[in-house]
Image (cartoon, rainbow, N blue to C red):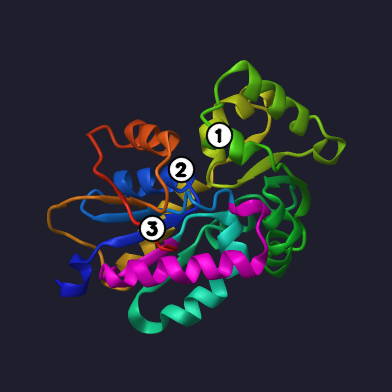
Amino acid sequence: MNSTALKPIGIFDSGIGGLTVANQISKILPNEDLIYFGDTAHLPYGDKSTAAIQAYSVKICNFLLSQNVKAILIACNSASAAAFELVKEYVGSKALVFNVIDPVVDYVSEQLPEKIIGLIGTKQTIYSNIFKKKIEEKDNSIQLKSLATPLLAPMIEEGFFNNKISNEVIEEYLGNEILQGIEALILGCTHYPLIANQINNYYKEKVEVIDSSRIVALYVQKSLEYAGLLNKLHKTENKFYVSDFTPSFENATQIFFKDKVNLEHYPLWD
């Protein structure tokens, strides 16, 4: 086995959202060691400028490269939209680089041609039009209806999900006329799988709710296998870092990773 295959996978997001993807990767690739960085000092990324997100992303990638990772997953739609090409160029041949948008675009193009598809996400993701551009490049028979839902990520980050408050906010957004008539809905933020059940309940299972976390994890698995970088030995440990301690992040790691998590504070911007 290639010795590079033994190196960990680096994953980053502005907060807890990327944990949904990290959890799926841990299930699908149980031998892989993960290094997760939550930039909690700057969450949410969705209302930040492109330049700011790019600066954060490069700084975090520097840290992940110092941890000797074999791959970096930008587990944030806002950062994937704003910084993927820059990060890919910056990292070069030092590690594989993945985003959370391309795997979903591939999925809808292959599985949902000629459908009316809704997309909800942060302002950065929606206003970048990146989903629309990429889907049209693959399949112009798909009609995409996009709506920015800026309250959802900070609401989830604060622990407001699966309760009355979150239900009211979700229903207000999904009832928007822009999303009427859709046959499927892309959850265009890695925080949103945490409210997927509430969204399914709203649609009464009549609209396919596309959870990117599993789609992305399968894409990473396929890509690592193709590159000969799957770790076939036993897992050692996952490591979790944050740029600022928040109770919600610590609680979320306990939800997804049942064992006690050693959460380390790494203030990149001090």
Q: Nearer the viewer, mark 3 or mark 2?
A: 3
Q: Residue at x 56, y 31 (%)?
A: 195
What is the magenta range? Answer: 45-73
> Is residue 112 toward the left or the right of residue 144 in the image?
left
Q: Give the residue type that dot 1 points to.
A: Ile
Q: In terms of secondary structure, where does tag 2 sit?
A: loop
Which numbered disc flags the more N-terminal residue, 3 or 2?
2
Q: Residues within 10 Å of mark 2 (few under 14, many from 20)?
A: many
Residue 69 shown in magenta = yes
Find residue 267 and name its label: 3
Q: Residue at x 76, y 33 (%)?
A: 173
Q: Are marks 1 and 2 in contact (CB under 8 Å)?
A: yes
Q: In terms of secondary structure, where does tag 1 sit?
A: helix
Residue 82 shown in magenta = no
Find residue 266 and name its label: none
Q: Give the residue type that dot 3 points to.
A: Pro
| Vertical relation: 200 (above or below) 23 | above
Q: Quarter holding the C terminus?
A: bottom left
Which residue matches tag 2?
Answer: 16
Which residue matches tag 1?
Answer: 156
Q: Residue at x 40, y 63 (%)?
A: 268
Q: Position of residue 28 (x, y in %)?
A: 32, 48
Q: Residue furthest front?
A: 270
